Amino acid sequence: MVQLFETIDVDVPVRTAYNQWTQFESFPQFLDEVESITQTSDTLTHWVVKVGGIRREFDAEITEQHPDERVAWTSTGGDTEHAGVVTFHKLSDTTSRVAVQLDWAPEGLAERLGALVGAGGHAVKKDLKNFKEFIETQGGETGAWRGDVDA
């Protein structure tokens, strides 16, 4: 398993950052490898991603979610095995920190080599920069789901 951890500070209130992160179907607008996400229920999503030219599909289940604090998930089937958590931290009334921890199992030679040279960490860092640009340019969230999912 490869573990990645990255953070970014965004110039929006923590509520705004969290609300946008709950809009999973908008992820292709700022996550480069994500082609589409379909939310099939409050806690289930279906992902289509393309990493290193390889297209993969999988389902993910939200295993814990608390408004303005955290969203955790794990893959439940398909072409990839991973789990993660995003936490949201208030730095001021207008600035927040978004922290991503991702655990994934590289499959195949290309993914294993990519993991060795830190490609996953670079990708997460770039995606967080894309999120920052998206949410700050947007000026607000495109929607919100403020439900609670207990672990």
Image (cartoon, grey):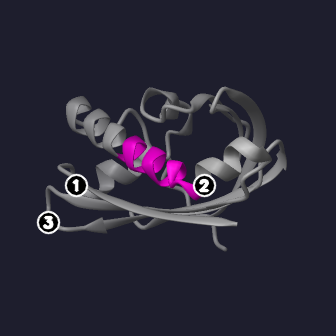
Residue occupied by mark 1:
13
Residue occupied by mark 2:
115
The answer for how far apart the CA atoms under marks 3 and 2 are is 35 Å
The answer to if 123 sits in the magenta stretch is yes
The answer for how far apart the CA atoms under marks 2 and 1 are is 33 Å
Residue at coordinates 73% horizontally, 58% vertically from top-left?
A: 105
The answer to the question of whether label 3 and label 2 lie on touching residues, with beta carbons closer than 8 A, is: no
Residue occupied by mark 3:
92
> From the viewer's perspective, is residue 89 above or below residue 56?
below
Q: In the image, residue 33 lies at what x, y percent?
A: 56, 33
Q: Amino acid at mark 3?
A: Ser
Q: In the image, residue 5 lies at what x, y percent?
A: 46, 65
Residue at coordinates 14% horizontally, 61% vertically from top-left?
A: 93
Q: Earlier in the sequence, mark 2 or mark 1?
A: 1
> From the viewer's perspective, is residue 49 above or below residue 86?
above
Residue 99 in view, yes or no: no
The answer to the question of whether label 3 and label 1 lie on touching residues, with beta carbons closer than 8 A, is: no
Which residues fall within the magenta stretch? Answer: 116-128
- Tag 3 secondary structure: loop
Q: Amino acid at mark 2?
A: Ala
The answer to the question of whether label 2 and label 1 lie on touching residues, with beta carbons closer than 8 A, is: no
On screen, residue 48 versus residue 101, left or right, reads right
> From the viewer's perspective, is residue 118 above or below residue 110?
below
- Image quarter (top left, top right, bottom left or bottom right) of the N terminus: bottom right
